[in-house]
Amino acid sequence: MDLSRIEHTFQDGLLGRSQDILRQLRGNARESAETMFAVYRNAYWSRLAEALGNDFPALKALMGDQAFDRMARAYIARHPSQHPSIRWAGRNLPAFLAAEAPYRDEPWFTDMARFDWGLAFAFDAAAAPAAGLANLAGVPPEFWGSIRLRFHPTLDAFPVSTPVDEARPRLLENAAIALDRQARCARAIMVWRVEHDVRFRAIDPLEHAALEAMQAGATFGAMCELVARQAGLDAAPARAAQILQGWLEWGAVAIVEHDELGSAA
Amino acid sequence: MTPRAVSSLGFGLGLRPQHYPVILDGAPELAGAIDWFEILSENYLVDGGRPLAMLMAIRARYPVVMHGVSLSIGSTDPLDMDYLARLKGLAARVEPAIISDHLCWTGVAGINMHDLLPLPLTEEALAHVAARIDRVQAFLGREIALENASTYVTFTQDSVPEWEFLRELHRRTGCRLLLDINNVHVSAFNHDFRATDYVDAIPREAVAYIHLAGHEHNGTYIIDTHDRPVVEDVWQLYAHAVRRFGPVATMIERDDRIPPLADLVRELAQARSLAASALSRPAEVA
């Protein structure tokens, strides 16, 4: 058996796909090759499950240790890590929970996994200075409609149907806390980082739609029209301005751009 | 920056996030107690945030060694050039005294098992690993050091002991060795050979630095857990190694159940004291 075949067969043994590798292995004077190979096999599954527990602490608290471990092993079997850093092993976990029975029937799981992952992403994503309200002060009123935003590179925003933003801090403090698992809501969560501090904020669906539009490159003027369609013409200007001001105050925006005198727009 | 002479590094610790604040506070009891830190490279192959900021603040005060777990030098998958490029980028920022990884493979078919898996000790594996070390060293523009991993199985087709395999890798490629004394002890017990035979076969000039760590003894085999203090047998093997290799950079590695930094500093002081004692009595070489 050549080296490549040895490695593939060894890995198949770790993944539980075949036991053929045992014929190539020796144990020691006290233990069989099978027992000693099990050290590797057990370490593989427990190491990945532990790493997922570290990256999804609130999901683990929500599910309980045993249920989380069972889920983690099912996930690892479906999505083996393909990244040099174990830190990225869980990147497909929210989608896995959303798609796979029985987890897909409990929206809390997918929402909490998405929230945990957003926080982990923001923790060490690329740094950038944040723009502030002062960046708006210099925009002449006639050019406000042309404002475009480049958001902070750590920003992640996603819809949830359960109040995981309220439950997460309580769960991390006490995993045994009683949650109303029937609770549902319509909101989105923004996660980003200011300096080294990861922040999050729940936003309503209208603000999330405005955020998605401006993340896709829409101008503030276009965002105002979007807000007007949902909130009404009278309320739109104040609501749109409030949304924009919030993002800037929170440090979720990196760069404010706008047309200037003589520009094509 | 020219890498520092390895023997001048002294006594170091693995850098762990739990210890960032106390290290950066510059507590008086740390003064002179820790000469350098080893980082787990993969933890800092990120784009930004607290880990990189802490690392650079600590790097401003201490020499740093980069220690990786995903080079997968023994894998028959292609070398991961994206990973190597990021590693080289981190090295450009950190200016490490040494870049190390393990004699192992971590996966094939695009999968990373995140474990240090054993290689058959054959001429085929030796040629394969040596060729990859050459490519990695050429890409990084410097020597790397490879660590002997603890192993739990051997292969029926093994043709040489691990120490000969390492010695030959060093001869063919010029790579250095990160000699993990605990891992020698663990593998010696697991595979029924004498740990001192291993240490005595390693060329003096090959050793870049030494790891010390704790393990879990299960009676019939030992698991390399890095979650507890160094045991007496490993201290004795370390003293034997110091008598053989002379003053060599040494560090304590703790990866789980991380104690307060002061506990590790006490353990490091024990290493420092033991090394001084061993060097003062070279005649006791076994």
Image (cartoon, helix red, strand yellow):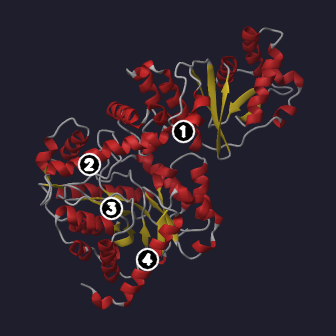
In which chain is the residue bearing label 1?
A: A
Look at label 3 and name its amino acid: His
The answer to which of marks 4 and 3 sits earlier in the sequence is: 3
- Residue denoted by label 1: A174
Bin the neighbour count of mark 4 within 10 Å (Cα to Cα): few under 14, some 14-19, many 20 and up.
few
Bin the neighbour count of mark 1 within 10 Å (Cα to Cα): few under 14, some 14-19, many 20 and up.
few
Query: In the rendered image, which quarter is residue B26 located in?
Result: bottom right
- CA gap, disc 4 to disc 3? 18 Å
Q: Residue at 22%, 39% (x, y): give it.
A: A12
**Labels 2 & 4 near each other (Cβ < 8 A):** no
The answer to which of marks 2 and 1 sits earlier in the sequence is: 2
Asked whether B285 or B139 is in front, the reply is B285
Disc number for residue B215:
3
Look at label 2 and name its amino acid: Tyr
**Residue A242 spot, x, y in % from top left:** 80, 24
Label 1 secondary element: loop
